[in-house]
């Protein structure tokens, strides 16, 4: 008891010798310059209220939105009519119709007037733009641009190119036999054309599922024109192309697949042709004097036919006489190797459409030659190769398809600059790299129309 009483009687503020602060601790608490004791109370309180120790910084609370509890259709009804008019002025009729069907709230505000406006005759293209957005929902139907309707495919997955002058209906369209309603198509060679429906089917198969279309490998063909002697071969590729100079950002969707085409045309060319013989070899009198090989719609404005004539002029004349023949044999027959000049050797790109040309003079074996005539087995032939990008197959009056067919010239304010749109990489390089890395044409590309002359049919330089 005595010991407990002595403990209670001891003053509470005094510490035992073992618990008293040492001289070093006392010196750290007292300021050496002023002699005052340092008070760490404010420091401890500031550490306790610091946000770093409480956890991550919290965002300030946003003010209460008075419209957060209002339903969507009532919120849209609150917007004044003038604001709706200003919003719709930035949208096309097809976009307004799609926006109308986005939700019930918008449909209650805009009603059915945008959908009725699509059926007006002046808004036919807007109607097709609106219907083209529904391709994914109809794998066994195809959009008909003549009727602006989705028709049922007659042979899904088995559509095939047929010979010319042969009726080849791909859909159950009532106007398929009407000669006045010609569907869009692209000219390949005299008597041969590529319908736009096959561009639709091949691009749909890559954009959605294989059941939406057909593979592009089924469209490749080889044929020979018996009247002119020209041989042709076509090959197609559907791939995702883009401008390498401006690649899309990671937040953007990838570009749609594009339909690429390559047409190789060749014919044996005798040496020393006069100008009239060159014209007879290059142009088709049965096809409005169009070239026998594949060309775009702007071939008359550029240097294409002049370059072909220049290449034909480089074919050497065979040696005549015994002395010249001996010299040619001693020099390893140099007339078999033809070197083109700096004008006709480089590749040419049309500035108004995504089309590239390559003109070559090659030594080709003639299968119809007499086997006893060794000198006539191999002959010089002119080879014209064309690469083109025919677009994404959505509509035939926009993009690359319209540019290759010359339709953009008829539209006001619509132009296509191939050197700006394609970029640094060539169409031929994109096409050939998908099949072999060794056959990419290592040629520099020049403009097909460097002077920008646009005479068309009025100019006589092309003939």
Image (cartoon, rainbow, N blue to C red):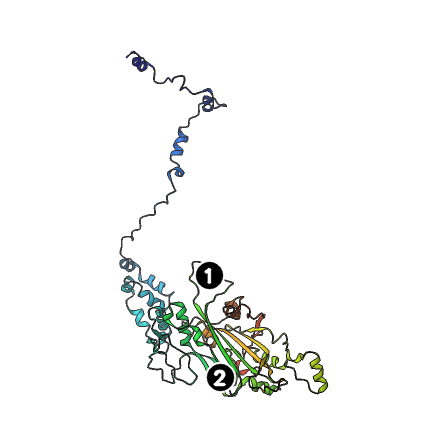
**C-alpha separation, residue under disc 1 versus residue under disc 2:** 40 Å
* Circle on res. 248: 1
> Up-down: is 98 above or below 2?
below
Residue on which disc 2 sits: 190
The mark lying in front, picked from 1 and 2, is 2
Q: Are marks 1 and 2 in contact (CB under 8 Å)?
A: no
Front in this rendered view, residue 377 or 168: 377
**Percent of width and height locating residue 416:** 49, 71
Front in this rendered view, residue 432 or 152: 432
Whether residue 412 is visible: no
Residue at far right of view: 323
* Helix, strand or loop at mark 2: loop
Q: Please state if 165 lies on the left or on the right of 457 as rendered.
A: left
Query: Number of callouts in the render?
Result: 2
Q: Please state if 211 lies on the left or on the right of 279 as rendered.
A: left
**Percent of width and height locating residue 76:** 29, 59
Q: Residue 198's image quarter?
A: bottom left
**Percent of width and height locating residue 267:** 56, 82
Say which quadrant the N terminus sits in.
top left
**Percent of width and height locating residue 133:** 36, 68
Q: Residue at x 37, y 72 (%)?
A: 126
Residue at far top of view: 2
Of marks 1 and 2, which one's residue comes earlier in the chain? Answer: 2
> Up-down: is 323 above or below 137?
below
Say which quadrant the C terminus sits in.
bottom right
> Up-down: is 358 above or below 374?
above
* Circle on res. 226: none
Q: Please state if 116 lies on the left or on the right of 422 as rendered.
A: left
Few, some or many residues within 10 Å of mark 1 (<14, 14–19, 20+): few
Whether residue 112 is visible: yes
* Helix, strand or loop at mark 1: loop
């Amino acid at each position: 008891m005595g010991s407990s009483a002595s403990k209670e009687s001891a003053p509470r503020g005094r510490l035992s010798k073992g618990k008293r602060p040492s001289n070093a601790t006392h010196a750290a608490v007292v300021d050496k310059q002023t002699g005052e004791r340092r008070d760490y109370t404010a420091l401890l309180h500031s550490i306790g209220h610091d946000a770093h120790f409480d956890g991550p910084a919290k965002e300030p609370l946003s003010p209460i939105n008075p419209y957060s509890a209002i339903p969507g259709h009532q919120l849209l009804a609150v917007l004044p009519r003038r604001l709706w008019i200003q919003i719709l002025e930035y949208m096309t009729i097809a976009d307004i119709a799609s926006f109308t069907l986005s939700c019930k709230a918008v449909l209650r505000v805009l009603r059915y007037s945008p959908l009725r406006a699509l059926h007006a005759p002046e808004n036919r293209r807007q109607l097709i733009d609106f219907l083209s957005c529904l391709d994914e929902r109809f794998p066994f139907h195809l959009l008909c641009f003549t009727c602006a309707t989705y028709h049922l495919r007659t042979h899904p997955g088995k559509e095939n190119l047929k010979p010319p002058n042969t009726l080849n209906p791909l859909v159950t369209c009532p106007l398929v036999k009407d000669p006045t309603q010609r569907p869009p198509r692209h000219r390949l060679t005299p008597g041969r054309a590529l319908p736009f429906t096959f561009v639709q089917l091949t691009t749909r198969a890559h954009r959605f599922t294989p059941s939406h279309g057909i593979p592009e490998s089924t469209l490749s063909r080889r044929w020979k024109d018996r009247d002119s002697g020209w041989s042709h071969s076509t090959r197609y590729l559907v791939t995702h192309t883009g401008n390498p100079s401006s690649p899309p950002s990671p937040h953007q969707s990838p570009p749609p697949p594009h339909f690429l085409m390559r047409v190789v045309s060749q014919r044996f060319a005798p040496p020393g042709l006069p100008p009239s013989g060159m014209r007879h070899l290059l142009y088709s009198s049965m096809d409005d004097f169009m070239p026998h090989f594949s060309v775009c719609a702007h071939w008359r404005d550029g240097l294409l036919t002049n370059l072909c004539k220049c290449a034909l002029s480089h074919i050497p004349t065979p040696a005549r006489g015994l002395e010249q023949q001996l010299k040619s044999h001693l020099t390893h027959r140099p007339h078999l190797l033809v070197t083109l000049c700096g004008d006709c050797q480089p590749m040419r790109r049309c500035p108004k459409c995504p089309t590239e040309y390559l003109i070559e003079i090659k030594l080709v074996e003639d299968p119809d030659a007499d086997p006893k005539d060794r000198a006539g087995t191999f002959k010089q032939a002119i080879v014209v190769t064309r690469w083109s990008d025919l677009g994404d197959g959505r509509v035939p009056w926009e993009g690359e398809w319209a540019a290759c067919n010359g339709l953009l010239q008829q539209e006001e304010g619509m132009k296509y600059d191939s050197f700006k749109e394609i970029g640094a990489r060539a169409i031929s390089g994109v096409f050939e790299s998908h099949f072999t890395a060794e056959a990419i044409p290592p040629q520099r590309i020049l403009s097909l129309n460097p002077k920008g002359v646009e005479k068309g049919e009025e100019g006589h330089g092309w003939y």
